[in-house]
Image (cartoon, grey):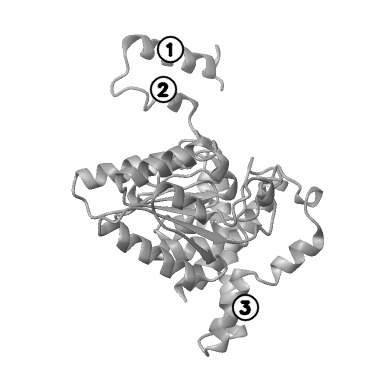
Amino acid sequence: MEAYRTMALARALDERAIALQRQGRIGFYAPHAGQEATLVGSALALEPDDWVFPAYRELSVALVRGASLQSIVDQLFGNADDLSKGRQMPNHFAFRDQHFVSASSPIGTQIPQAVGAALAARYRREPVVTIAYFGDGATSSSDFHAGLNFAGVFHAPTIFLCQNNQFAISFPRDRQTKSATLAVKAEAYGFPGVVVDGNDVRAVYAAVRTARARALAGDGPTLIEAQVYRLGPHSTSDDPRRYRPDAEVAAARERDPVHRLKTELVNAGLWDEARDAALWEEVRATIAGAVARAEQVPPVDPLSLFDDVVAERSARLEEQRSGCAAHLTGPKGVP
């Protein structure tokens, strides 16, 4: 039930965020419809002290780990309450308390970072693992090969979770590699690779729990290929109709992980249509409230660009800050 509620909230936020971008109220969004089961199932299999190194579709992971909906919406708007102070692209959030490292737009850079953090944790004798999320396109990056090779050599307690959503933007998976699967690439680096149905939240949960136990036992990393399908565009800058047929998308919607889990719960007698309608009404109202609040928060103070650069501002930096403040205020004291 926890998984389904989170998946419903994430799907509803996806829909609203795309609408907000189309209306010009936020600048960018990368949806993850069709991948919720992989994200929620994997996140539930982790422990709070584990560290997450996301790509840019891990919204559901952040929700599972306790990031507030309001903080996520504030980041989409880049307002004064945005934890990253408007310095990141929308949808590239970070949450220190939830051990959720900042997303990064360059493809695959989080993979070696996750390996390094895992080795640091082992050096400190901390019983934690790191998990790196990435798409099928990242398996063609140099960071993928460098990160997995290093992890294999040094038995890093890292889980590599590849969400194979079939397209690297518009580039299909079969044009990237002739490997039978993406998981099989792990064999070259000396550790296991497994394939799971990414639409099955239980299968993903079990695979990640197994990989986590293996990592903590000192047996090294695991590469998990979760086979999913991206139902929407790569981002709000993309038109997927240009490179994939409607019939293919329609077939994928028949395997929608949100609908699948709902059906399983109904068939088990744990859920019904009335409660489902109430849940969707609730999550959409909650999102609407968060959006309304975010739009009432003022923009980030421009002078904050002088913060977080050095521990103590130098005289020269103070002079520059004062000059910037004077420029913003204007000669008559009117912004």
Image location (x, y in percent) of residue 16: 64, 56
Please report whichever mark, 1 or 2, sits nearer to the chain's N-terminal start.
Answer: 2
Query: Left of 233 or right of it: where is 76?
Result: left
Please report whichever mark, 1 or 3, sits nearer to the chain's N-terminal start.
Answer: 3
Of residues 302 and 279, the one nearer the viewer is 279
Of residues 237 and 81, the one nearer the viewer is 237
Q: Look at the picture and state if 65 lies above or below 116.
A: below
Report which residue position mark 2 lands on. 306
Image location (x, y in percent) of residue 60: 50, 59
Residue 42 lies in quadrant:
bottom left
Contact between marks 1 and 3 (CB within 8 A): the answer is no
What kind of element bears circle 2? helix
Report which residue position mark 1 lands on. 320
Of residues 213 and 265, the one nearer the viewer is 213
Contact between marks 1 and 2 (CB within 8 A): the answer is yes
Report which residue position mark 3 lands on. 277
Q: Look at the picture and state if 62 lies above or below 92.
A: below
Query: Left of 54 or right of it: where is 124?
Result: left
Mark 3 surroundings: few (<14), some (14-19) or many (≥20) residues within 10 A: few
Mark 1 surroundings: few (<14), some (14-19) or many (≥20) residues within 10 A: few
Image location (x, y in percent) of residue 183: 51, 56
What kind of element bears circle 3? helix
Image location (x, y in percent) of residue 262: 58, 78
